[in-house]
């Protein structure tokens, strides 16, 4: 399980005005120092400044000490799909051809440890305060790792295993395809009761409370470590999921970021990053106010490039002005024309966009500065669910739109 870290937050007052913190997603993709990487696969930060990002495209790992503003290139012998650091010096990266690398100097040197998993590694996790980790990969393989070797390898199922989560050193879960397995009493067992679906992601907050997600936008939840119930089933497919506690979590789909603040009872759209036809594949949060997602972008010419976004404090603004981009779309459901209304004190030009569930942009309209009410023709849209986004130079906000004729 990826370790959690807490950051102190504070507020301050100046004479008459009360200031609050504004948070949002910032695109740091151009800070990745390579032209060759087309997919960023995993993220791990030990604090708000120092972190590592892996790519399956090159023999490189990207290391930052300033929160993603700049990166240095660290080299490995095979592309790495997964990474976890135990502290600022010790860490593991695993990936192609079943290889696992270990560092004891923050990644200045990544050394191949003895042994290979028989297939590409898709999941890697270390329980808190443990020097023994667990890995999973293609063709149903699982195993254990330490700084010297891979051991206790076992082929559990035929399906590829994509995610593994151990909240303690004695108990963990793995998923992939239509399979969830449970590690308890030093063995893997098939004691889980869950909806039939394909699962790509898993996060266990503790031995009883966890989440799995995957095909068709399915998210399931367990509160006893054995029985799983459906929370959400809405396309598109979910690639990764992460929780900082039992209530706050994020899920990345092939195009969107969703979040929950009530343990998954309600999932809300957080953002639609500018990916073109690209995908989001990984999410990592240090706390409720600081997190990262990664994947790849693809332009109209189908050229791929890294995608890396950071959720952070983007400004301190006077109270009463923090929701500058709060907007309403009505009627909703709509038939042919919608009205867009946003705060009158918005003094910047904006762009209004509509996307389908596959991330394709279907409509774009420029909104002049100071506008209050705009009517937009959506008669060409078929019945269904869409997402609309309002953007300025620094901010964005998103709403769900239903077309029902």
Image (spheres, rainbow, N blue to C red):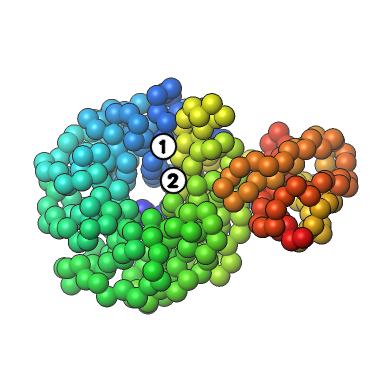
Residue at (71% x, 33% y) in the render: 393
Q: CA distance from mark 2 to mark 1?
A: 8 Å
Task: Locate the C terminus by quadrant.
Answer: bottom right
Give the left or right position of residue 334, taking residue 383 as reference. right
On the image, the x and y values in percent for residue 336 come to 81, 53
Query: Residue 142 appears in which quarter of the rendering?
Result: bottom left
On the image, the x and y values in percent for residue 287 come to 50, 53
Label 1, on which residue? 40
Query: Residue 140 appears in which quarter of the rendering?
Result: bottom left
Q: Earlier in the sequence, mark 2 or mark 1?
A: 1
| Foreground pick, 52 / 123 | 123
Q: Residues within 10 Å of mark 2 (few under 14, many from 20)?
A: many
Residue at (40% x, 71% y) in the render: 195
Residue 7 showing in the rendered view: no
Residue 333 showing in the rendered view: yes
Q: Please tell me whether mark 2 sits on a helix, a strand or a loop.
A: strand
Give the left or right position of residue 215, taking residue 167 as reference. right
On the image, the x and y values in percent for residue 138 come to 25, 50
Using the image, tell me which numbered label, if any, was put on residue 281.
Answer: 2
Give the left or right position of residue 296, taking residue 365 as reference. left
Query: Residue 347 appears in which quarter of the rendering?
Result: top right
Using the image, tell me which numbered label, if any, was put on residue 197.
Answer: none
On the image, the x and y values in percent for residue 71 come to 42, 28
Q: Is residue 316 above or below residue 191?
A: above
Is there a contact, CB below 8 Å, between mark 2 and mark 1? yes
Residue at (36% x, 53% y) in the render: 2
Q: Residues within 10 Å of mark 1 (few under 14, many from 20)?
A: many
Give the left or right position of residue 60, taking residue 250 as reference. left
């Amino acid at each position: 399980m990826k370790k959690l870290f807490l950051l102190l937050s504070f507020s301050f007052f100046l004479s008459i005005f009360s200031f609050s913190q504004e948070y949002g997603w910032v695109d740091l993709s151009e800070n990745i120092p390579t032209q060759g990487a087309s997919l960023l696969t995993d993220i791990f930060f030990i604090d708000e400044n120092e972190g590592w990002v892996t790519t399956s495209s090159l023999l490189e790992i990207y290391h930052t000490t300033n929160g993603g503003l700049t990166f240095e290139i660290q080299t490995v012998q095979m592309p790495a799909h997964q990474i976890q650091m135990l502290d600022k010096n010790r860490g593991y990266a695993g990936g192609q051809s079943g290889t696992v690398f270990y560092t004891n100097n923050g990644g200045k040197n990544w050394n191949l440890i003895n042994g290979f998993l028989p297939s590409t590694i898709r999941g890697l996790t270390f329980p808190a305060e443990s020097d023994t980790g667990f890995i999973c990969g293609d063709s149903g393989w699982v195993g254990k790792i330490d700084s010297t070797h891979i051991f206790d390898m076992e082929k559990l199922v035929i399906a590829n295993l994509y995610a593994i989560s151990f909240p303690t050193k004695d108990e963990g879960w793995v998923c992939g395809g239509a399979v969830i397995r449970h590690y308890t009493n030093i063995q893997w067992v098939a004691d889980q009761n869950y909806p039939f679906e394909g699962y790509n992601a898993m996060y266990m907050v503790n031995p009883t409370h966890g989440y799995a997600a995957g095909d068709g936008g399915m998210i399931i939840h367990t509160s006893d470590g054995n029985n799983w119930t459906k929370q959400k089933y809405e396309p598109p497919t979910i690639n990764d999921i992460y929780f900082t506690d039992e209530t706050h979590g994020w899920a990345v789909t092939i195009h969107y970021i969703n979040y929950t603040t009530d343990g998954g009872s309600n999932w809300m759209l957080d953002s639609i990053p500018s990916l073109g036809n690209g995908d989001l594949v990984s999410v990592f949060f240090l706390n409720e106010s600081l997190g990262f997602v990664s994947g790849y972008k693809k332009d109209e010419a189908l050229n791929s490039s890294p995608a890396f976004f950071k959720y952070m404090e983007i400004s301190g603004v006077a109270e009463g002005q923090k929701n500058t981009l709060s907007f309403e779309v009505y009627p909703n459901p709509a038939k042919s024309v919608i009205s867009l209304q946003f705060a009158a004190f918005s003094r910047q030009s904006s762009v209004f966009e509509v996307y389908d569930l596959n991330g394709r942009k279907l409509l774009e309209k420029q909104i002049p500065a100071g506008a209050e009410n705009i009517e937009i023709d959506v008669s060409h849209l078929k019945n269904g669910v869409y997402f609309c986004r309002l953007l300025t130079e620094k901010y964005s906000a998103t709403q769900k739109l239903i077309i029902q004729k």
